[in-house]
Every structure is written in structure tokens, then in C-alpha cells.
Image: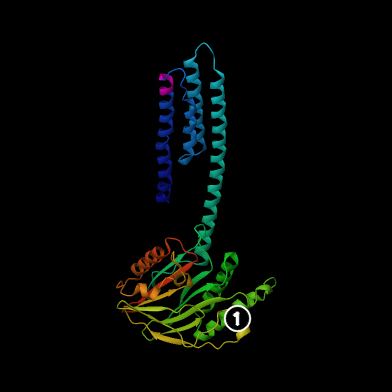
Amino acid sequence: MPQRREGLRRPVRAGRALLAIPIAWIVAVSVIDLLAPPHIHLGALLVAAPAITPLFAGPWSVGLVAALAVIAQTAIGLVRDPEQLLSSNDQAQIIALVLVGTALVIFCVLRERRAKELAQVRYVSEAAQRVVLPPLGKKIGPLRVASLYLAAEAEAQIGGDLYAATRTTSGTRLIVGDVQGKGMTAVNDAALLLGAFRIAAHRPASLGELVAYLDQSVCWDLTEPGESGRYGETFITATILDIPDHGGLVQMVACGHPPPLVQRNGQPTTMDTPHPAPPLGLGELTHPRYHVDSFPLEPGDLLLLYTDGVTEARDSTGTFYPLAQRITGWMENDPDTFLDRLRRDLLHHVGGHLNDDAAMIVIERTATPRA
């Protein structure tokens, strides 16, 4: 909290310091106008002072600068012609300054109100993300984990990509997925699947039974009143894994989702599944049989899980991000370091802006399982 307050004070202090610029401009224009020949009038330049103030200050400061500009214009008129109260030209310039200053104050008030509303929306979005999609722990059993969610929209913090992990008596189960569609409907579907996973993943059921339950949960939601129009049109691609604590093979069921990668000694290997399953939510239409595939994950290996927002990210020429090719030769064995480099490389490829949400998880099995 003290750090946040200090961060809020810094822009305020900077804005107050920058107020010296319009005030100095008013003083300079006034002095030059008074020293200039009688036929030269520079008072019109005073309007620049309140005009630039909204760039770094709020309505009170803008009103103050506008008032100083009006006072300066009045003083110039009185000093130039003390016998006449104010000429018609001076009166016109004062009226113009009052109108411009009033308009700028109203603009700043509306801008601050909009900024407060946007800050509140961002706060609610971040709170929803922490509830629906909390970050994974740095250590889960014998696993070291790093996770990252990159939202395509700058104002949004959460979308249809999802991931979660839960502990069992013998290992760790994880899910990474992507909801078809966007907006609040996708967020709702993601929350539903994550809730079903957290409820059922820790139970002593096989991985195939767990995936069948998740598919039924999505199908049940689509058959609820008001959701019948989405049945058969909404689905969720996902990969569900079971990583044992004490060695052994990682079990995996892939439901239409991009395959994970295992990075070993700088060389990535794609863990394609010979028995792919349809996306979750289509079980009532396809009646799939979930085959459990497996692959080794040795201590020191990095397991990379991701959504299609990574592999379908395009550069300025329309070229997809070649994930396996780009990470070839990377020797980072720390999940956080590896994920940070991947984030920077991905954003560099797309020019700093993603067209779709992207979620990434990097997992390392430590040499000695934790108790």
C-alpha cells in the first residue's frame, strides 16, 4: 500500500512542477506585449497557457492558469491605455480566454470522471481474474512452475484462455485450455470448466474419467435454459495432464488443443498424441473414448504448455510464430527465466501487440520430490 501511494504521488508532483511552464508563458507574453510597440498586440498568445495545461494537470490547475491568463490580459489592457478602462479588442480577448478556460475545465472534469470509471473497470477485471484464473504457485509438489496470461485487449485482463493445477495423493494434475469465442460468454465458460476441474481433479479417478466428467460439465451447461442456441457451437480445446511425483511417465489427454513441448538440453520435442480427442463440449455429439497417452519428463526438462494465441500470433507479414523453431537452442533451465524470454520474443515477433489472448505455462520437475 505505501508503494502504491508513493506511485500515485509522483504524477501529482510532476504535474505541479510542470505548471511552471504555462505560468512562465503568461509572464513572458505579458512582459513582451507591454514592451512591444503600441500597434503590436500579443495578448492572443495567452490562450496557449490554459490550452497546454490539461496535458499534465487537472481541472483546478487549468482553472487557475485560465484565471491568471484573464488577469494578465486585463492588466495589459489597463497598462497600455490607462485613460480608457478596456478597449473593445481587450474585452474580446478576455471573453475568449474565459470561454476557452471554461471549456477546458469542463473537459478535464469529464476526463477525470472517465479515468476513474476506467480504473474501476480495470480493478474489477483484475479481481475477476484473480478469482477465476489465479496464478499458479511457483512450486507445486516436486514441480517448479511459471505461468503467464497475455490479454489481446489492453483494457481486458481476462478472456477465454484458462489453466489450473491441483494436487492429488500421487502427483499433480493440470489443465490448459481455450474457449471458442470471446467476451463475457467465453469468460463464463472458462470459469465453469475451471470450477469443474478443481472439484473433480483431486478425486481418485483415472485421467480418462476426469476428462469425461469435464466434457459432461460443459455439455450440461450448454443444455441449461437459455443456452440451447449454443449447443454444438461452443466448445473448449484443452490438454489435461497428470504428472506423478516420483518419476514415471506423464499422462495426457489432448482434446483438440495444441500439443505440449518438452525442452531438453536446448532441443524441443513436440508431444503429439496418436489418440486425439474432440474438444470438450462436443461429447454428446461424438461420444468419444478418451485414450490416455504418456511421455517422459526427466529432472531438468522443461514442459511448455500454451494456447493457440502463441502459435497463431502473426508478424507484420502474416507469418505465424514458429514456437519450436524459436526456442531451439535456449539453455535456460529456470521456468521463470525461460518464460520471460519467451514472452519478450513473442511480443517482438508480433510488434508488441497480440491479436488473440495467450496463456503459457513452463514446468520443471526437480531432482528430489518435495514431501
Classify 48 as above or below 149.
above
Q: Is residue 7 above or below residue 215?
A: above
For the residue pair 24 and 164, the one nearer the viewer reads as 24
Q: Is residue 204 magenta?
A: no
Q: Locate the C terminus and report the quarter of the image it occupies.
A: bottom left
User: Is residue 182 toward the left or the right of residue 173 in the image?
Assistant: right
> Which region shows up in magenta?
31-35
x 33%, y 67%: residue: 337
Given residues 269 and 340, the one toward you in this image is 269
Compared to residue 133, the image places residue 287 above or below, namely below
Magenta-colored segment: predominant secondary structure: helix
Place of residue 14 in the rendered image (x, y in percent of width and height, measured from the top left): 40, 41
Q: Position of residue 151 (x, y in %)?
A: 48, 63
Query: Where residue 303 sits in the image (x, y, percent)?
Result: 38, 77
Q: Amino acid at mark 1?
A: Leu
Task: Report the residue marked by disc 1.
Answer: 282
- Which residue is rendered at x = 57% and y = 26% of the image? 95
Tell me: 85 left or right of 338: right
- In the image, taking residue 308 as reference, residue 370 lies left or right, namely left
Residue at the image position 51 percent from the left and 28 percent from the top = 67
Between 177 and 322, the one lying in front of the other is 322
